[in-house]
Amino acid sequence: METNIYTTKKLEKFVKKLIRTDEDPHDRSHSLLGDWNATLFYVDRKKCLLFTNKKTKYNVILSNIRASDLSSIGEIFKNAFYSQLVYDGIISTYDHIKSLTGRLIFRPTDNDRSTLGFQNHSLANWDWWRDKYVTLENMPMKELNGRINNVPIKLVKSYKTEDYTFASTEMKKLILE
């Protein structure tokens, strides 16, 4: 099982060696969680990655990523994803999460404007919340990430207020089904 991670142009330059373009992303069996988008942003001149699930808009932030970390980025992502799920109250075993994600395959950008716009909005919220912590070392990453995942969002096009949901609620439905 594989999970496709579509990168932004900025992240694509950073993870050049990991990008796979040789095969069609639709040929293989995909993860139950679906595809993800990832982008690169900076905090105190340190590289951070924001992963956003396309189905649920659930976010996972990896902070202080170096080029030497890229060889084990799959395990780093799975550990951060699992710990964020636990922080958000979505209880599952690590082995279950590991089997749901499978192997991470980084792909060039797919220009999914909906998800990229959502990521930009999440980063704007995140910048606003992080101002009180000054440095990256002082930031409670799980708490800030949990705040992003608990902002009301609408995944369907409608005008009803009852269609608003939370990314953490949608991810819980997806994992525990």
Image (cartoon, rainbow, N blue to C red):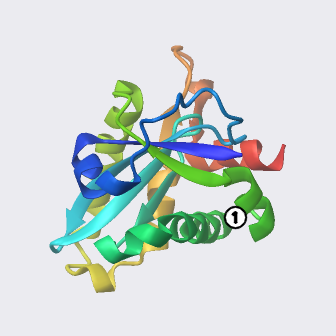
Which residue type does callout 1 highlight?
Gly
Q: Residue furthest left?
A: 45
Left or right side of 117 for 97 = right
Instruction: From the top left corner, tell me how far across and down residue 52 is, in percent.
Output: 47, 46
Between 129 and 122, the residue placed more toward the observer is 122
Identify whether 86 is placed above or below 116.
below
Q: Is residue 93 visible?
A: no
Left or right side of 103 for 153 = left
Which residue does the image show at 75% across and 69% down from the upper left?
94
Between 146 and 4, the residue placed more toward the observer is 4
Q: Residue furthest front?
A: 22
Identify whether 76 is placed above or below 10.
below
Instruction: From the top left corner, tell me how far across and down residue 127 is, in percent.
Output: 24, 59
Left or right side of 152 for 68 = left
Which element is circle 1 on? loop
Count how many numbered circles sit on residues in the image. 1
Left or right side of 160 for 135 = left
Which residue does the image show at 64% across and 67% down from the upper left?
82
Instruction: From the top left corner, tell me how far across and down residue 170 is, in percent.
Output: 66, 41
Q: Residue furthest top?
A: 158
Which residue does the image show at 72% across and 40% down from the upper left?
32
Instruction: From the top left corner, tell me how far across and down residue 102 is, in percent.
Output: 68, 53
Which residue does the image show at 62% across and 37% down from the upper left?
34
Q: Which residue is mark 1?
A: 89
